[in-house]
Each structure stands twice: as C-alpha cells, then as structure tokens.
Amino acid sequence: MMTLTGLVSSFAMGTTIFIGQRIGEKNPREALSHAIAYIRVCGAGGKGVEIAFVMVQGIIGAFCVRVPVSFFMSRIRPVSLFRVGLATPCSIVVQILLCFGCMIYIQKKCVAADGVV
C-alpha cells in the first residue's frame, strides 16, 4: 500500500511541477496568476478566512512546532532519529487542533450571521 501511495503522490507532484514549468516558461506573470488561482481553489473555494487560515496553519505547523520540536529532540542524548522524527506527528496534531478551532469559529460566525447552522 505504501508503494502505491508513494507512486501516486510522486506522479501528482511530478505532474504539478511539469505544468508549472510549462506555464512559467511562457510568461512569468501568467504563472503567478495561475499559482494564485490554484491556491484559491485548494483553499476552500477562495474565501479569505480559509485561505489565510491555510497559510497560517502551514507556517505554525512548520516553524512553530516542527522545527523547535526536532531541535529540542536532537539535543537529548543519545540522539535518536525516532525522537527527531516525532516532530512531524506533533505538528500534525497541532494542525488538526487548529482546523477544529477554525471550523468552530466559522460555524459560530455563520450562526451569528444567518441564525441557522
């Protein structure tokens, strides 16, 4: 199963890079507009709160959790790849909690605006 998952994700990444190269070699400004459109599509339909949340969630997960946890785990002697690798699951847990928080925020905001869930 892991091999199939790796194959599919590698194909998807390769295709995305190939398309980006073809768009970028024609017109760099067009490549930027396509990148922004791609982010809007992936960011829950292009709504401002969701797009900002996706960006902030990625930054918090990478720089505020993953990097510090891997750094501190690398300082524990003897250094273990397992301990350093725990940074990724810690980051995922924080990002999932952030998603739940954002979902609750948006739901309360919709209830306040419409009066209906």
Image (cartoon, rainbow, N blue to C red):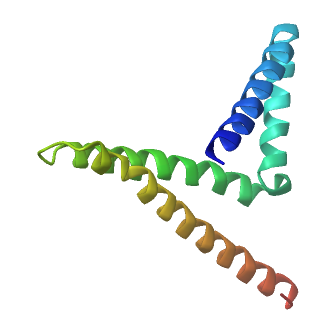
Residue 80 position within the rendered picture, expressed as x and y whole percent measured from the top left: 23, 44
Quadrant of image for the C terminus? bottom right
Q: Residue at x 47, y 46 (%)?
A: 62
Q: Is residue 69 left or right of residue 40?
A: left
Residue 55 position within the rendered picture, expressed as x and y whole percent measured from the top left: 62, 48
The foreground one among 65 and 107 is: 65
Query: Which image quadrant for residue 32?
Result: top right
The foreground one among 11 and 16 is: 11
Q: Is residue 1 above or below residue 38?
A: below
Q: Is residue 112 above or below residue 41?
A: below
Q: Residue at x 40, y 48 (%)?
A: 66
Q: Is residue 17 above or below residue 53?
A: above
Residue 74 position within the rendered picture, expressed as x and y whole percent measured from the top left: 22, 42
Q: Residue furthest left?
A: 77
Residue 8 position within the rendered picture, expressed as x and y whole percent measured from the top left: 74, 38
The foreground one among 83 and 98 is: 83
Q: Is residue 18 above or below residue 84?
A: above
Q: Residue at x 48, y 52 (%)?
A: 60
Q: Is residue 53 left or right of residue 116?
A: left
How many numbered marks are there? 0
Q: Residue at x 56, y 65 (%)?
A: 96
Q: Residue furthest top?
A: 25
Q: Is residue 106 left or right of residue 68?
A: right
